[in-house]
């Protein structure tokens, strides 16, 4: 534990020294586009890959432009519990040597239920005994352009909850229902349901490729195994539902720009 804390402190010091603050514009839209600009061409150093591992799934957009093998080696050097080789083997049945540079082996999920199935396979392969209770969840904004992602622990396979989109309604969901894969803090009786392990917010289009999805699965699994917790998610979700998605994405991106040292 002391060794890990020293590593984190050392990493933080180096990142602080090399980080640059992103420019802020006169409007949400300008700041949003400025914060996101260049992510598709950002090649990461081993230090930045290690920093991204600590930050969890919010690092997905920052990893995208870097070669899969470079990312994998960076994760190994950072002593990640799960690397991309593990993810491709466990989730897709492919070794990294069989995967083209694009990361595409013809398997892409379109729903969080599918994503969760891959996620649970990775955790189960690693030996997490209650892997069936870890979920990947999402809420899109109303235009469907941005997505609020979260990794949650929910020790239930059937839930009765207040519909967050229509609070006057009580809904029951099974694991086969699409809305089961939204986060819920409590059930309809006020009993705690979800523990949020990690969360991220970014444009939905960044998650369309298998490479991006494999990175998400890898970082999510490491967040579980690193015992990460992000209770601040419950402050973010009401803002998201109130129409502040673009502002949340901008703020999260600017925060990550500073931490990864873009």
Image (cartoon, rainbow, N blue to C red):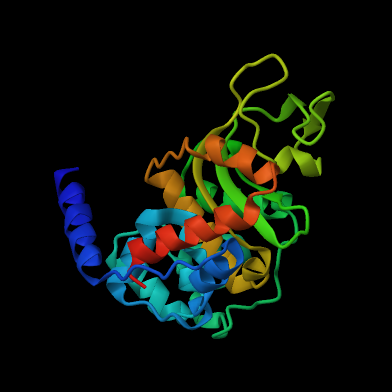
Q: Is residue 52 visible?
A: yes
The quarter of the rendered structure image containing the N terminus is top left
- Quadrant in which residue 208 is drawn: bottom right
In the displayed structure image, the side of residue 53 where residue 181 appears, left or right: right
- In the image, is residue 21 above or below residue 119? below
- Quadrant in which residue 249 is drawn: bottom right
Nearer to the camera, 89 or 9: 9
Residue drawn at (20%, 68%) of the image: 17
Nearer to the camera, 168 or 129: 168
Nearer to the camera, 118 or 194: 194
Residue drawn at (22%, 61%) of the image: 11
In the displayed structure image, the side of residue 19 where residue 239 appears, left or right: right
Q: Position of residue 27 (x, y in %)?
A: 57, 64
Residue drawn at (72%, 49%) of the image: 113
- In the image, is residue 82 above or below residue 206? above
Q: Is residue 131 visible?
A: no
Residue drawn at (65%, 16%) of the image: 190
């Amino acid at each position: 534990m002391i060794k890990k804390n020293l590593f984190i402190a050392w990493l933080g010091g180096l990142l602080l020294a090399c980080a640059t603050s992103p420019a802020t514009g006169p409007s949400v839209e300008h700041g949003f586009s400025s914060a996101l600009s260049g992510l598709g061409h950002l090649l990461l150093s081993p230090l930045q890959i290690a920093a991204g591992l600590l930050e969890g799934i919010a690092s997905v957009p920052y990893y995208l432009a870097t070669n899969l093998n470079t990312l994998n080696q960076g994760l190994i050097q950072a002593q990640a519990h799960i690397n991309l080789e593990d993810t491709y083997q466990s989730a897709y049945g492919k070794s990294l040597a069989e995967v083209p540079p694009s990361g595409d082996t013809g398997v892409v999920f379109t729903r969080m239920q599918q994503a969760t199935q891959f996620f649970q396979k990775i955790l189960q392969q690693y030996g997490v005994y209650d892997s069936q209770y870890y979920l990947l969840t999402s809420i899109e904004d109303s235009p469907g352009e941005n997505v609020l992602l979260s990794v949650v622990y929910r020790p239930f396979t059937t839930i009765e909850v207040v519909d967050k989109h229509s609070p006057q309604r009580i809904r029951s969901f099974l694991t086969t229902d699409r809305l089961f894969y939204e986060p819920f803090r409590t059930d309809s009786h006020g009993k705690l349901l979800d523990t949020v392990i990690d969360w991220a917010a970014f444009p939905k289009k960044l998650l369309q490729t298998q490479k991006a999805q494999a990175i998400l699965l890898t970082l999510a699994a490491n967040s579980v195994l690193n015992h990460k917790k992000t209770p601040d998610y419950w402050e973010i979700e009401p803002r998201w539902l109130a129409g502040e998605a673009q502002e949340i994405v901008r703020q999260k991106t600017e925060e990550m720009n500073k931490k990864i040292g873009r």
